[in-house]
Amino acid sequence: MNCTTIEDHFSDYLEDSLPAKRRQSVTDHLRTCPNCQREFDRFQQSVAALQQLPEIEPSAFFDTDLQIQLVLIETMPPPEKVTILDQVVGKFWQLMGSWRWAVSIVLVFVLIAVYLMATRIGVALVSSSEKQSNSQVQSVEQRGLITEDSDSFPFSSDSMFDPAVEIQQNYVFPIVTYSALSTGGRL
């Protein structure tokens, strides 16, 4: 037997509850191993100190309290099975703490969904300045300065202004407004 096995049998050896063959092997090991002998002596001292402590008497109501608790445990209904979905929803409401948080989160998801749908369909929000720019381009096209089917200057090829390279014209003239405010001759 090794030292660890011997230490596991200290209590049974002290109470004399080991079979005869095993008891003899523990006795032989304790005679030859000073470390195990020292540990067994400490174990005996600890048991002797515990036996000298006074025995604590339970209260007079201990038995009745114990019986009541046992009856309550036996009469309790078994716990209900909770599905994973119920656990997730319950945890969600527990974390949110109030309905306002839940409504806020739902609104965020709705806004994200609307944004994604709008970009997927290709709906573009056109500002008023873009509308003005488009109307200016249309008026220039109506005057014949820019044609939709040609990206070059509106001059004929026999003109002296014939460009060597085709140039795409996308320039839109800015709108200049004059106000009634006077600058007093200064800019």
Image (cartoon, rainbow, N blue to C red):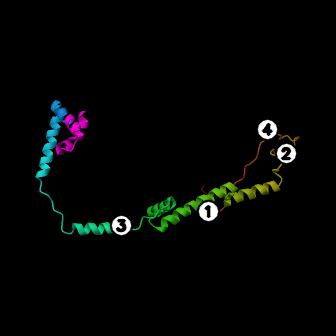
**Residue, x 23% and y 37% (percent of image)?**
22
Amino acid identity at mark 3: Glu
Amino acid identity at mark 2: Phe
Which of disc 3 and disc 4 is earlier in sequence?
3
CB under 8 Å between callouts 2 and 3?
A: no
- Tell which tag, 4 or 2, sits nearer the viewer: 4
The residue that label 3 is drawn on is: 74
Q: CA distance from mark 1 to mark 3?
A: 96 Å
Label 2 neighbour load within 10 Å: few <14, some 14-19, many 20+: few
The residue that label 4 is drawn on is: 165
In the image, residue 90 lies at what x, y percent?
47, 63
The residue that label 2 is drawn on is: 155
The question of residue 22 being in magenta is answered with: yes
- Tell which tag, 2 or 3, sits nearer the viewer: 3
**The N terminus sits in image quarter:** top left
Amino acid identity at mark 1: Ser
